[in-house]
Image: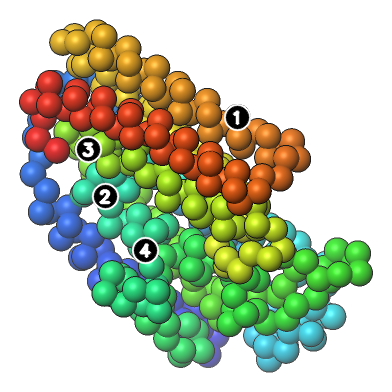
Amino acid sequence: MSRFGRTVARATGLLLTALMMAELCSGVAAAQTATPGAATGLAAIKQYAVEHAAAQKAATEQLVRFAGRYYDLAEGTGFDYQALWDSNTPEVAGLLAASKGSWLEASTHYEMSEGLIAGIPSLACYDVWIDSGPSGEEDAAEALDWTLELPNGQKLEKPGNIYHHLTEPIVWGTDERFVGLELDIDGDGKQELGEVLPEANVFLASSQVLDIAAGEMLAAVNEWDPTIEDAFTALATMIPTMSEYFEQWKLSSFVTGETSTEKSFVATSRLFDVNGILTGLNLTYDEVGSAVEEVDPELHGQITAGFEDLTTFVADLYQQEVDGKRFTPDEADLFGSEAQAKATALAGQVSQAIALLGLQV
Protein backbone atom coordinates (compact mmCIF):
# COMPACT_ATOMS: atom_id res chain seq x y z
CA MET A 1 0.00 0.00 0.00
CA SER A 2 1.28 3.48 -0.83
CA ARG A 3 1.97 6.04 1.89
CA PHE A 4 -1.09 7.97 0.61
CA GLY A 5 -3.17 4.80 0.93
CA ARG A 6 -1.98 4.22 4.48
CA THR A 7 -2.81 7.81 5.39
CA VAL A 8 -6.34 7.49 4.01
CA ALA A 9 -6.85 4.17 5.79
CA ARG A 10 -5.68 5.39 9.17
CA ALA A 11 -7.91 8.48 8.88
CA THR A 12 -11.10 6.45 8.23
CA GLY A 13 -11.89 5.80 11.89
CA LEU A 14 -11.31 9.44 12.67
CA LEU A 15 -13.68 10.49 9.89
CA LEU A 16 -16.47 8.26 11.22
CA THR A 17 -15.90 9.63 14.71
CA ALA A 18 -16.04 13.18 13.39
CA LEU A 19 -19.32 12.55 11.58
CA MET A 20 -20.88 11.20 14.77
CA MET A 21 -19.59 14.15 16.76
CA ALA A 22 -20.90 16.61 14.18
CA GLU A 23 -24.34 15.01 14.47
CA LEU A 24 -24.20 15.17 18.27
CA CYS A 25 -23.15 18.82 18.33
CA SER A 26 -25.69 19.70 15.64
CA GLY A 27 -28.36 18.14 17.82
CA VAL A 28 -27.35 20.36 20.72
CA ALA A 29 -27.44 23.43 18.51
CA ALA A 30 -30.84 22.57 17.05
CA ALA A 31 -32.35 22.33 20.53
CA GLN A 32 -31.67 25.99 21.27
CA THR A 33 -34.17 28.77 20.76
CA ALA A 34 -32.70 31.88 19.18
CA THR A 35 -34.13 35.08 20.56
CA PRO A 36 -33.20 38.19 18.58
CA GLY A 37 -31.53 40.93 20.61
CA ALA A 38 -31.28 44.64 19.98
CA ALA A 39 -27.89 45.23 21.60
CA THR A 40 -25.06 46.44 19.43
CA GLY A 41 -21.68 44.76 19.31
CA LEU A 42 -22.88 41.23 18.53
CA ALA A 43 -21.04 41.25 15.21
CA ALA A 44 -17.83 42.17 17.02
CA ILE A 45 -18.32 39.30 19.47
CA LYS A 46 -18.79 36.86 16.61
CA GLN A 47 -15.75 38.22 14.79
CA TYR A 48 -13.66 37.74 17.91
CA ALA A 49 -14.80 34.12 18.22
CA VAL A 50 -14.23 33.45 14.51
CA GLU A 51 -10.72 34.92 14.56
CA HIS A 52 -9.62 32.75 17.47
CA ALA A 53 -11.34 29.63 16.10
CA ALA A 54 -9.59 30.17 12.75
CA ALA A 55 -6.23 30.68 14.44
CA GLN A 56 -6.76 27.50 16.47
CA LYS A 57 -7.50 25.58 13.24
CA ALA A 58 -4.34 26.89 11.57
CA ALA A 59 -2.27 25.70 14.54
CA THR A 60 -3.91 22.24 14.65
CA GLU A 61 -3.17 21.81 10.93
CA GLN A 62 0.49 22.40 11.70
CA LEU A 63 0.36 19.89 14.55
CA VAL A 64 -1.05 17.23 12.21
CA ARG A 65 1.77 17.81 9.73
CA PHE A 66 4.40 17.40 12.46
CA ALA A 67 2.69 14.32 13.90
CA GLY A 68 2.37 12.81 10.41
CA ARG A 69 6.06 13.23 9.65
CA TYR A 70 6.94 11.82 13.07
CA TYR A 71 4.69 8.82 12.44
CA ASP A 72 6.34 8.15 9.07
CA LEU A 73 9.81 8.25 10.67
CA ALA A 74 8.68 5.93 13.47
CA GLU A 75 7.05 3.54 11.01
CA GLY A 76 10.33 3.45 9.09
CA THR A 77 12.07 2.03 12.15
CA GLY A 78 9.32 -0.45 12.96
CA PHE A 79 8.33 1.77 15.90
CA ASP A 80 11.68 1.15 17.59
CA TYR A 81 11.91 4.46 19.42
CA GLN A 82 15.54 4.20 20.38
CA ALA A 83 16.38 3.54 16.72
CA LEU A 84 14.10 6.42 15.73
CA TRP A 85 16.04 8.78 18.00
CA ASP A 86 19.48 7.45 17.09
CA SER A 87 18.92 7.66 13.34
CA ASN A 88 16.95 10.93 13.16
CA THR A 89 18.01 12.94 16.22
CA PRO A 90 18.03 16.49 14.74
CA GLU A 91 14.76 16.09 12.81
CA VAL A 92 12.91 14.35 15.63
CA ALA A 93 14.03 16.95 18.17
CA GLY A 94 12.85 19.69 15.81
CA LEU A 95 9.50 18.00 15.21
CA LEU A 96 8.84 17.65 18.92
CA ALA A 97 9.77 21.26 19.66
CA ALA A 98 7.57 22.45 16.80
CA SER A 99 4.72 20.24 18.01
CA LYS A 100 4.86 21.84 21.44
CA GLY A 101 4.76 25.27 19.84
CA SER A 102 1.76 24.41 17.67
CA TRP A 103 -0.09 22.87 20.61
CA LEU A 104 0.48 25.98 22.72
CA GLU A 105 -0.67 28.21 19.85
CA ALA A 106 -3.85 26.20 19.34
CA SER A 107 -4.63 25.97 23.06
CA THR A 108 -4.03 29.68 23.61
CA HIS A 109 -6.52 30.66 20.92
CA TYR A 110 -9.05 28.23 22.35
CA GLU A 111 -8.73 29.71 25.83
CA MET A 112 -9.23 33.21 24.41
CA SER A 113 -12.64 32.15 23.10
CA GLU A 114 -13.56 29.51 25.70
CA GLY A 115 -15.81 31.89 27.60
CA LEU A 116 -18.07 31.98 24.54
CA ILE A 117 -17.68 28.39 23.32
CA ALA A 118 -18.30 26.85 26.74
CA GLY A 119 -20.85 29.43 27.82
CA ILE A 120 -23.24 29.30 24.87
CA PRO A 121 -25.43 26.16 24.76
CA SER A 122 -25.34 25.80 20.97
CA LEU A 123 -21.52 25.73 21.00
CA ALA A 124 -20.80 24.08 24.37
CA CYS A 125 -20.57 20.57 22.91
CA TYR A 126 -17.25 21.56 21.37
CA ASP A 127 -15.88 22.61 24.74
CA VAL A 128 -16.70 19.19 26.19
CA TRP A 129 -15.08 17.37 23.26
CA ILE A 130 -12.05 19.61 22.86
CA ASP A 131 -11.18 21.02 26.27
CA SER A 132 -13.21 20.08 29.34
CA GLY A 133 -14.93 16.70 29.21
CA PRO A 134 -13.88 13.92 31.64
CA SER A 135 -12.70 10.51 30.50
CA GLY A 136 -14.75 7.37 31.01
CA GLU A 137 -12.31 6.30 33.71
CA GLU A 138 -13.00 9.51 35.63
CA ASP A 139 -16.76 9.68 35.15
CA ALA A 140 -18.39 7.05 32.94
CA ALA A 141 -21.80 8.72 33.16
CA GLU A 142 -20.65 12.24 32.23
CA ALA A 143 -17.91 11.34 29.74
CA LEU A 144 -18.65 12.09 26.10
CA ASP A 145 -19.27 8.82 24.28
CA TRP A 146 -16.74 8.87 21.48
CA THR A 147 -13.95 6.57 20.29
CA LEU A 148 -10.44 7.36 19.08
CA GLU A 149 -9.18 4.69 16.66
CA LEU A 150 -5.43 4.55 16.19
CA PRO A 151 -3.59 3.62 12.95
CA ASN A 152 -2.61 0.27 14.51
CA GLY A 153 -6.27 -0.60 15.10
CA GLN A 154 -6.29 0.07 18.84
CA LYS A 155 -9.37 1.91 20.10
CA LEU A 156 -9.61 4.31 23.02
CA GLU A 157 -13.19 4.41 24.31
CA LYS A 158 -14.41 7.58 26.02
CA PRO A 159 -10.85 8.95 26.19
CA GLY A 160 -11.88 12.38 27.50
CA ASN A 161 -11.23 15.81 26.03
CA ILE A 162 -8.66 16.13 23.25
CA TYR A 163 -6.47 18.86 24.72
CA HIS A 164 -5.92 17.71 28.28
CA HIS A 165 -6.54 13.96 28.23
CA LEU A 166 -4.82 13.25 24.91
CA THR A 167 -2.62 15.73 23.10
CA GLU A 168 -1.06 17.53 26.09
CA PRO A 169 -0.13 14.35 28.00
CA ILE A 170 1.12 12.83 24.74
CA VAL A 171 3.38 15.72 23.71
CA TRP A 172 4.66 16.44 27.24
CA GLY A 173 4.90 12.78 28.28
CA THR A 174 2.83 12.89 31.46
CA ASP A 175 0.85 9.71 30.71
CA GLU A 176 3.09 6.67 30.51
CA ARG A 177 0.59 4.91 28.23
CA PHE A 178 1.44 7.38 25.50
CA VAL A 179 5.24 7.42 25.87
CA GLY A 180 7.45 5.63 23.35
CA LEU A 181 10.75 6.49 25.02
CA GLU A 182 11.99 8.69 27.84
CA LEU A 183 15.32 10.39 27.14
CA ASP A 184 17.49 13.43 27.76
CA ILE A 185 16.73 15.53 24.70
CA ASP A 186 18.66 18.65 25.71
CA GLY A 187 21.69 16.72 26.96
CA ASP A 188 21.79 18.26 30.45
CA GLY A 189 22.14 14.90 32.14
CA LYS A 190 18.55 14.44 33.33
CA GLN A 191 15.19 13.51 31.88
CA GLU A 192 12.67 16.30 32.44
CA LEU A 193 9.06 17.17 31.64
CA GLY A 194 8.47 17.00 27.90
CA GLU A 195 11.62 15.00 27.15
CA VAL A 196 9.93 11.99 25.62
CA LEU A 197 9.31 10.42 22.26
CA PRO A 198 5.51 10.07 22.02
CA GLU A 199 3.98 6.79 20.93
CA ALA A 200 3.46 7.58 17.25
CA ASN A 201 0.05 5.95 16.73
CA VAL A 202 -1.74 7.86 19.48
CA PHE A 203 0.18 11.05 18.67
CA LEU A 204 -1.00 11.02 15.05
CA ALA A 205 -4.57 9.96 15.78
CA SER A 206 -5.11 12.50 18.56
CA SER A 207 -3.60 15.30 16.48
CA GLN A 208 -5.86 14.42 13.56
CA VAL A 209 -9.00 14.34 15.69
CA LEU A 210 -8.04 17.66 17.31
CA ASP A 211 -7.78 19.17 13.84
CA ILE A 212 -11.14 17.67 12.87
CA ALA A 213 -12.75 19.04 16.03
CA ALA A 214 -11.18 22.47 15.49
CA GLY A 215 -12.55 22.51 11.95
CA GLU A 216 -16.04 21.56 13.07
CA MET A 217 -15.93 24.19 15.81
CA LEU A 218 -14.83 26.84 13.33
CA ALA A 219 -17.70 25.92 11.02
CA ALA A 220 -20.18 26.11 13.91
CA VAL A 221 -18.87 29.51 15.00
CA ASN A 222 -19.10 30.78 11.41
CA GLU A 223 -22.73 29.63 11.27
CA TRP A 224 -23.58 31.03 14.70
CA ASP A 225 -25.98 33.98 14.67
CA PRO A 226 -25.32 35.59 18.06
CA THR A 227 -28.06 37.14 20.14
CA ILE A 228 -27.89 39.31 23.22
CA GLU A 229 -29.22 36.29 25.13
CA ASP A 230 -26.19 34.33 23.97
CA ALA A 231 -23.83 37.01 25.25
CA PHE A 232 -25.41 37.25 28.70
CA THR A 233 -25.78 33.46 28.96
CA ALA A 234 -22.02 33.14 28.43
CA LEU A 235 -21.34 35.78 31.07
CA ALA A 236 -23.72 34.25 33.62
CA THR A 237 -22.38 30.75 33.01
CA MET A 238 -18.63 31.35 32.88
CA ILE A 239 -17.92 34.18 35.34
CA PRO A 240 -18.62 32.11 38.50
CA THR A 241 -16.13 29.32 37.62
CA MET A 242 -12.96 30.72 39.21
CA SER A 243 -12.68 28.18 42.06
CA GLU A 244 -12.51 25.27 39.61
CA TYR A 245 -9.62 26.84 37.68
CA PHE A 246 -7.71 27.80 40.82
CA GLU A 247 -8.06 24.26 42.20
CA GLN A 248 -6.56 22.91 38.98
CA TRP A 249 -3.77 25.48 39.27
CA LYS A 250 -3.08 24.45 42.88
CA LEU A 251 -2.76 20.78 41.96
CA SER A 252 -0.54 21.43 38.94
CA SER A 253 3.24 21.41 38.88
CA PHE A 254 3.20 25.21 38.68
CA VAL A 255 2.24 25.26 42.37
CA THR A 256 2.80 21.77 43.75
CA GLY A 257 6.05 21.27 41.86
CA GLU A 258 7.63 17.89 41.17
CA THR A 259 5.30 16.17 43.62
CA SER A 260 2.31 16.92 41.38
CA THR A 261 0.66 13.83 39.91
CA GLU A 262 -1.49 15.80 37.45
CA LYS A 263 -1.18 14.78 33.81
CA SER A 264 -2.85 17.93 32.49
CA PHE A 265 -2.14 21.68 32.71
CA VAL A 266 1.60 21.14 32.50
CA ALA A 267 2.32 23.02 29.29
CA THR A 268 1.27 26.40 30.61
CA SER A 269 -0.05 27.75 33.89
CA ARG A 270 -3.77 27.58 34.50
CA LEU A 271 -3.54 31.27 35.39
CA PHE A 272 -2.63 31.94 31.77
CA ASP A 273 -5.79 30.11 30.71
CA VAL A 274 -7.94 32.09 33.14
CA ASN A 275 -6.52 35.31 31.73
CA GLY A 276 -7.62 34.21 28.27
CA ILE A 277 -11.11 33.26 29.39
CA LEU A 278 -11.60 36.56 31.21
CA THR A 279 -10.33 38.50 28.19
CA GLY A 280 -13.09 37.00 26.05
CA LEU A 281 -15.77 37.57 28.68
CA ASN A 282 -14.65 41.15 29.27
CA LEU A 283 -14.83 41.87 25.54
CA THR A 284 -18.29 40.32 25.43
CA TYR A 285 -19.59 42.65 28.12
CA ASP A 286 -17.86 45.64 26.51
CA GLU A 287 -19.84 44.94 23.35
CA VAL A 288 -23.28 44.46 24.96
CA GLY A 289 -22.92 46.57 28.10
CA SER A 290 -24.48 49.58 26.41
CA ALA A 291 -27.87 47.85 26.75
CA VAL A 292 -27.40 47.88 30.54
CA GLU A 293 -26.04 51.42 30.57
CA GLU A 294 -29.17 52.69 28.82
CA VAL A 295 -31.46 51.48 31.60
CA ASP A 296 -29.18 51.53 34.66
CA PRO A 297 -25.90 53.46 34.32
CA GLU A 298 -24.95 52.74 37.93
CA LEU A 299 -25.25 48.96 37.49
CA HIS A 300 -23.28 49.18 34.25
CA GLY A 301 -20.52 51.00 36.10
CA GLN A 302 -20.47 48.36 38.83
CA ILE A 303 -20.16 45.54 36.29
CA THR A 304 -17.40 47.34 34.42
CA ALA A 305 -15.51 47.94 37.67
CA GLY A 306 -16.04 44.32 38.71
CA PHE A 307 -14.50 43.06 35.50
CA GLU A 308 -11.54 45.40 35.96
CA ASP A 309 -11.04 44.19 39.52
CA LEU A 310 -11.20 40.48 38.66
CA THR A 311 -9.08 40.62 35.50
CA THR A 312 -6.41 42.76 37.18
CA PHE A 313 -6.30 40.39 40.16
CA VAL A 314 -5.68 37.32 37.98
CA ALA A 315 -3.28 39.11 35.63
CA ASP A 316 -1.19 40.28 38.59
CA LEU A 317 -0.92 36.76 40.01
CA TYR A 318 0.11 35.41 36.63
CA GLN A 319 2.74 38.11 36.16
CA GLN A 320 4.20 37.31 39.57
CA GLU A 321 4.41 33.66 38.54
CA VAL A 322 6.09 34.57 35.25
CA ASP A 323 8.59 36.70 37.19
CA GLY A 324 9.61 33.67 39.24
CA LYS A 325 7.25 33.65 42.22
CA ARG A 326 6.34 30.12 43.30
CA PHE A 327 3.04 30.20 45.15
CA THR A 328 2.27 27.60 47.81
CA PRO A 329 -0.86 25.40 47.79
CA ASP A 330 -2.18 27.37 50.77
CA GLU A 331 -1.69 30.63 48.86
CA ALA A 332 -3.42 29.11 45.84
CA ASP A 333 -6.40 28.24 48.03
CA LEU A 334 -6.48 31.75 49.48
CA PHE A 335 -6.25 33.44 46.10
CA GLY A 336 -8.80 31.04 44.66
CA SER A 337 -11.28 31.98 47.37
CA GLU A 338 -10.65 35.66 46.75
CA ALA A 339 -11.07 35.28 42.99
CA GLN A 340 -14.27 33.30 43.49
CA ALA A 341 -15.66 35.98 45.81
CA LYS A 342 -14.97 38.65 43.21
CA ALA A 343 -16.49 36.49 40.48
CA THR A 344 -19.59 35.68 42.55
CA ALA A 345 -20.23 39.37 43.18
CA LEU A 346 -19.75 40.16 39.49
CA ALA A 347 -22.02 37.30 38.43
CA GLY A 348 -24.70 38.62 40.78
CA GLN A 349 -24.54 42.02 39.10
CA VAL A 350 -24.76 40.41 35.67
CA SER A 351 -27.82 38.48 36.85
CA GLN A 352 -29.40 41.78 37.90
CA ALA A 353 -28.73 43.13 34.42
CA ILE A 354 -30.31 40.07 32.82
CA ALA A 355 -33.46 40.51 34.89
CA LEU A 356 -33.51 44.24 34.21
CA LEU A 357 -33.32 43.66 30.46
CA GLY A 358 -35.98 40.94 30.61
CA LEU A 359 -33.73 38.37 28.94
CA GLN A 360 -34.48 34.65 28.93
CA VAL A 361 -31.16 32.89 29.56
Assess disc 2: are there few (<14), some (14-19) or many (≥20) residues with their C-alpha within 10 Å of its C-alpha.
many
* Residue at image point 35% right, 55% down: 127
| Amino acid type, label 4 | Gly
**Residues tagged 3 and 1 counted as in contact (Cβ below 8 A):** no
Front position among marks 3 and 1:
1
Q: CA distance from mark 2 to mark 1?
A: 31 Å
Q: Where does the image place residue 101, in percent across and percent down from the top left?
A: 65, 53
Q: Is residue 280 above or below residue 108?
A: above
Cα distance in 3D space between marks 2 and 3: 12 Å
In primary-sequence order, the first of circles 4 and 3 is 4
The residue that appears at 69% across and 78% down in the rendered structure is: 73
Q: Is residue 117 left or right of residue 323?
A: left
Label 4 with label 3: CB-CB less than 8 Å: no
Which residue is denoted by mark 2 in the rendering? 123
Amino acid identity at mark 1: Asp
Neighbour tally class for label 3: few under 14, some 14-19, many 20 plus, Cα within 10 Å: many
- In the figure, is residue 211 to the left or right of 177? left
Relative height, residue 233 to residue 305 (above, below): below
Res 316 label = 1
For badge 2, the amino acid type reads Leu
Q: Earlier in the sequence, mark 2 or mark 3?
A: 2
Which residue is denoted by mark 4 in the rendering? 133
Callout 1: helix, strand or loop?
Answer: helix
Instruction: Locate residue 102, reporting x and y percent.
Output: 60, 54
Q: Is residue 55 visible?
A: no
Marks 2 and 4 close (CB-CB < 8 Å) = no
Percent position (x, y) of residue 180?
A: 68, 82
Question: What is the secondary structure assignment of the residue under circle 2?
Answer: loop
First-in-chain label (2 vs 4): 2
Q: Secondary structure at mark 4?
A: loop
